[in-house]
Image: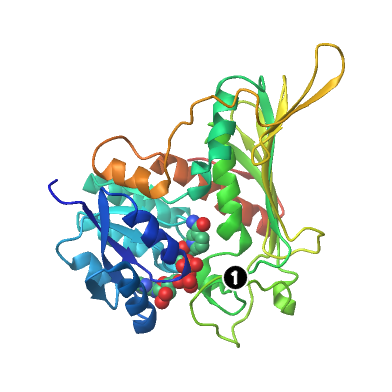
Amino acid sequence: MCHPLRLGIIGAGQISQGAAKEINEDSRASVVAIADPSPERLEALADTIGAGLRFASGEELIAADGIDAVYVAVPNIFHARLAKLALEAGKHVILDKPFAMNLAEAQEVAAAATASGRVLMLGMNQRFKPSAQLMRARVAAGQFGEVYHAKACWRRRAGIPRIGSWFTQKGISGGGGLLDIGVHMLDMTLYILDNFKPLSVSGATYTKLGNQGLGSGGWGMSEVDPNAVFDVDDFATALIKLEGGVSVALDASWALHQAQANTDEVQVFGSKAGGLANAGEIYRFAEDGGYQVLQGGEKNNLPPTVSGNRFSNFIGACLGEHPSEVSVEQALAVQAIIDAIYESSASGRDVAIKI
Ligand SMILES: NC(=O)c1ccc[n+]([C@@H]2O[C@H](COP(=O)([O-])OP(=O)(O)OC[C@H]3O[C@@H](n4cnc5c(N)ncnc54)[C@H](O)[C@@H]3O)[C@@H](O)[C@H]2O)c1
């Protein structure tokens, strides 16, 4: 290709502000087009980033010439439709999380990707963090022995994206904190364990604080409807069983009565040691019978699986330099688990997963 990869951004909301800059920081790509039905947000981002092509809808951007790939960052209800349309139009797609409103929709997008031969990548940014990369390398190198359990959490005390925005309306978002931030920690954990083979799930989701008007955070640029009913989860918990006798406990809250403003961490427990990903610590019984807490320094020279961020990885995949680091199969497994958590909560029973 004699020109940089030409990217169009669908959705000029909050996440796209930083994303547009990250894409343009990669010399192999350039943001040439923006689409958003809000003229103010469209013009503001297009001006900031210097994108000449401007569209009032994702559909128009997808139909336009001169665009090789799209980043889809819109309310969740539009994810599957726009990703599918873009793939069918021969464009590569990086789709922000969550994959879709549910597994059936996600599978339709996956089928469109296979048929098109274009790259479809979920924009799971957490797994590109150096701490996640190091933890994955440590697990793969056997530093924890047999890893049999992981605890993953992203618990915010008051982090509901603005109450009344699309995020808090189930018909547009598909779900609350579990789908919004639980998905990140679930993905990061399965990536660290290198195990995307779920067998069953027991989950519970709750709507207890947002519906009282408590726990609102500041995220999101879309309009707020003061009359909208808050009908999504503000706390979710699950026990997920994976192939190989491995279990994962997951907590995700947008709002919770807890001391810390924010806690996000993945902890693994193995036969030789345990460890915390973000803290970069390892815990184990020492040979002298004592107990060791090893700070991040030890064996930090393990190579990461990938370097760069989600966009540089996507760009490399579009240019045929390597496969994308987030495979469609992995993304489908994550969506299947999330569906199963909601189903288990509604039915009060364990849910078996077959994908
Ligand atoms: N990876 C992450 O860490 C992360 C963080 C936040 C949000 N997200 C995801 O990014 C997506 C967008 O979130 P946000 O925080 O930017 O929301 P936002 O509400 O700030 O912005 C959404 C934008 O999409 C626009 N839009 C709505 N329908 C559209 C359509 N059909 N075509 C084009 N534009 C349309 C809206 O006008 C708005 O400007 C969501 O799917 C969200 O889950 C990811």
**Is residue 76 something one can see in this rendering?**
no
The residue lying at 67 percent from left, 23 percent from top is 144
User: As drawn, which residue projects farthest toward the right?
Assistant: 289
For the N terminus, the image quarter is: top left
Which residue carries the number 1 mark?
161
Count every numbered label the image shows and give the total.
1
At mark 1, the secondary structure is loop
Residue 30 % position (x, y): 26, 57
| Residue situated in front as seen by the camera: 84 or 353 | 84
Residue 200 % position (x, y): 62, 40
Ligand 1 within 8 angstroms of badge 1 C-beta? yes
Residue 93 % position (x, y): 31, 54
| Residue situated in front as seen by the camera: 276 or 76 | 276
**Is residue 247 something one can see in this rendering?**
yes
The residue lying at 60 percent from left, 47 percent from top is 185
Horizontal side of residue 353 vs 233, given as left or right: left
User: As drawn, which residue projects farthest toward the left?
Assistant: 2
Horizontal side of residue 140 vs 36, given as left or right: right
Horizontal side of residue 128 vs 158, given as left or right: left
The residue lying at 59 percent from left, 30 percent from top is 243
Horizontal side of residue 64 vs 17, given as left or right: left
Mark 1, other Cα within 10 Å: few <14 / some 14–19 / many ≥20: many
Q: Quadrant of residue 205?
A: bottom right
The residue lying at 67 percent from left, 74 percent from top is 216
Determine whether 259 is above or below 351 in the image.
below
User: As drawn, which residue projects farthest toward the bottom?
Assistant: 227
Q: Quadrant of residue 260?
A: bottom right
Amino acid found under the numbered disc labelled 1: Pro
Residue 169 % position (x, y): 56, 74
Q: How is the image coloured?
A: rainbow
Determine whether 241 is above or below 207 in the image.
above
Q: Quadrant of ligand 1?
A: bottom left
